[in-house]
Image (cartoon, rainbow, N blue to C red):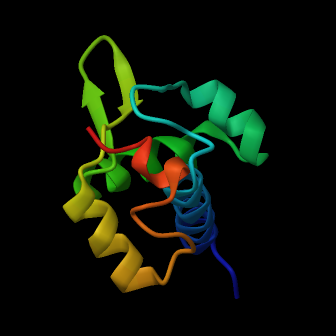
Amino acid sequence: MHDYMSTTSDSTGAVCAKIRNDILGGSLRAHDRLKVRDLAARYSVSTNPIREALHQLRGEGLVVITPNRGAQVRPLDESLLAQYQRNSGIAGTLHDPLVRGHCQ
């Protein structure tokens, strides 16, 4: 039986992974504003999983959430990118211009 809570949790996990991949892959760049409605449309989900995913990504250090201003992609440093690269096996290296574009 699939209840509402597990469906929401599944959606949040999936959309969180997509946003994370877009940040690490360069589709979402440092300082990009992350508008909940735009992201919901982009990933074809409701706004609740987007909000939950943004809070999770804030905890991972990929997103900054400022009261009354919303969420932004955090400028990433090389050590955080290297950690994600080691842990998830993302393509590219720190010498890749796309990846370097995130580093501040």
Q: Nearer the viewer, residue 41 or 86?
A: 86
Marks counted in the figure total 0
Q: Residue at x 53, y 68 (%)?
A: 13
Q: Is residue 38 above or below residue 94?
A: above
Q: Nearer the viewer, residue 66 or 12?
A: 66
Is 65 left or right of 34, judged from the image as shown? left
Q: Residue at x 40, y 43 (%)?
A: 102
Which percent across, then down, holds residue 47? Answer: 60, 37
Q: Tell me the quarter of the picture where residue 38 sits.
A: top right
Q: Is residue 74 above or below residue 33?
A: below
Which percent across, then down, holds residue 93? Answer: 46, 69
Image quarter (top left, top right, bottom left or bottom right) of the C terminus:
top left
Which percent across, then down, holds residue 27? Answer: 63, 43
Q: Is residue 91 above or below residue 64?
A: below
Q: Tell me the quarter of the picture where residue 81 sits.
A: bottom left
Which percent across, then down, holds residue 50? Answer: 54, 44
